[in-house]
Amino acid sequence: MMPRSGEPARRRLQQAAIELFCERGYDQTTTAEIATRAGVTERTFFRHFPDKREVLFDGQGKLREMLTGAVAKAPATLKPLEALYRAFRSFEQPLEDNRPFSLPRQQVIDRTPALQERELTKVAALAEALALALRQRGVDERLAALAAQTGMATFRYAVASWFADPTGGLGTHLDRAFDELDGLASSFSTRQERRGQGIR
Amino acid sequence: MMPRSGEPARRRLQQAAIELFCERGYDQTTTAEIATRAGVTERTFFRHFPDKREVLFDGQGKLREMLTGAVAKAPATLKPLEALYRAFRSFEQPLEDNRPFSLPRQQVIDRTPALQERELTKVAALAEALALALRQRGVDERLAALAAQTGMATFRYAVASWFADPTGGLGTHLDRAFDELDGLASSFSTRQERRGQGIR
DNA sequence: AACGTAATGACAGTCACTGTCAAACCGGAT
DNA sequence: ATCCGGTTTGACAGTGACTGTCATTACGTT
C-alpha cells in the first residue's frame, strides 16, 4: 500500500489533476494518469471524487455555506442585492489568496465544454442557496430568485474581469460591476405601455 | 441493412428513448436498448446524436433561431424585456401543440441530474443568443445580458407553472409571470444608501 | 503488542462513446 | 432495366469513465 505520507491523497489528486489538465488538457488526461501522478490507484480517485470533473469543483460546498452565512448575518434593513454585495465583498480576501490556484483552474474550465457545463450547475446551485438565504430574510420568493440570479451573474462578471486584470484587487471590480448594475436597474422594467412618466 | 422504412431512424430513436426513459428511467436505460427498440444498431444512435442526453434536446436549434428572429422583428421602440415577452408570446401555439411530447420529457429531466445539467447549458446558450439579439437592437451589452437572463428565467417559470396546470393556456401563465416580474422591478435596485427619495 | 476502523489496492465488469471498413440503400443518369 | 455516386447503416474492435467487491495495509487506540 502507498505510504500515507505527506499531503493527504485528496490534495495530491487535485494537484496532479490541475497539473495534467494544464499540460495536456482535460480531455487528453485520463483518471488513471491523474491517480498515477498522485501515487494512488484509479479506484482511489473515485473514492475521493464522484467523477472526473468534480476534482476541480471541491471548495463549492464551503463557499456556499460561507456566502449564505454572510447573507444571513447582513443587516436586516439592506435590500436583497445590497446584502448579496456585502456577502461577496466579505470574500475578497480569501479569493485573493486563492488566485494562484483558481486562475489556471478557470483557464482549464474555459476551454473545456464538459467543465463549463458542470460549472453552470454549480453556479445555479449557489444561486439557489443564496435565494433561500434571502427568503429567510423575509424577501419575497420570486424577488429572492431574481436577485440571487442577478447577483451571481454580477459576481461572476466581476471575478472574470478580475482574472483578466487583477489591478486594484477583486474589490474594485466588484464595485464597478455592481455600480454598472445599479445604473441598469433604472432601465429595467417589463412593460412599457402601462406606465406613464409618473413614478411610483 | 435495416430497411429504411416508415419514420426516419432519427425520430424512431427519439420516440424509443423517451418511452424507455419513462418506463425505466434515464440511468437504467442503455443506448443499446434504445437502438434495439428503434430497430437500429447502437452505432447508428451515435450517428444521429452526439451523446445519450442529446436525444432529448433536439429542437433547441430551431427554437433558438425562431426566438432570436422574433426578437429581431419586434418593434424597435420596445424595451428589452417587452421584446422578449412578445417573442415568447409568439410561441404560445407551437408550444401548446408540443405539450403531449414535452410534458413527459420534462418529467424525465426533472428526476435526472445529468439531464438537468444539460438543460442548464441549453438554457444558458439560449439566453446568450437572446442577449445577442437584443444587442443588435441597440441595447447596451450588460443590460442585454441581464434582460436575457431575467426573461429566460421568467419564461421558464411560466412554462413550469403551465406544465403543472394547463388551465388558461401558456399565454395566461406567461402574462402572470411577466406581471409578477413587473411588480418586482420596482423593488429591484443595488445600492440603497446612495439614493435619496428622489427619482431618476 | 493486540485491536478496530478507515483508507487503499487489486480485479473484474458495465456502459458511453469512437474509429474503421465493408455492405446496403437511394436517387438520378444512361 | 442497369449502372453509379453519395449517403446511411451494420459489424467489430477498442478506449476510458465509473462501480462492486474483497482482501490487505495503514493508523489511532488501548
Image (cartoon, coloured by chain):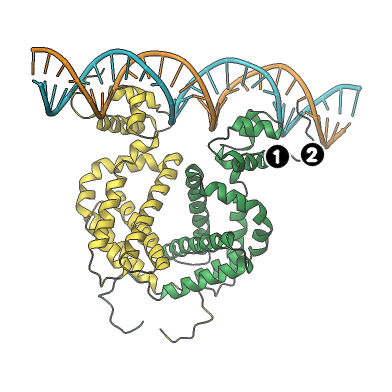
Chain colours: A green, B yellow, C cyan, D orange
**Does residue B42 appear in this view?**
yes
Residue B187 seen in this snapshot: no
At label 1, the amino acid type is Arg
User: Considering the image in quadrants, where does the N terminus of chain B appear?
Assistant: top left
Label pair 2/1, CB-CB below 8 angstroms: yes
For residue A73, the mark is: none
The residue under label 2 is: A6
Please state which of residues B47 and C11 is positioned toward the viewer in this rendering. Answer: B47
Q: How crowded is mark 2: few (under 14 residues within 10 Å), some or many (20 or more)?
A: few
Q: Earlier in the sequence, mark 2 or mark 1?
A: 2
> What residue does disc 1 label?
A12
Q: What residue type is labelled 2?
A: Gly
Q: Which of A147 and B52 is in front in this view?
A: B52
Quarter of image, res A30:
top right
Check disc 2 and report its element: helix, strand or loop.
Answer: loop
Residue A96 point in image, percent of width and height: 66, 60
| Left or right side of A141 for C26 | left
Q: Is residue B139 above or below residue A58?
A: below
Q: Distance between the residues labelled 2 and 1?
A: 9 Å
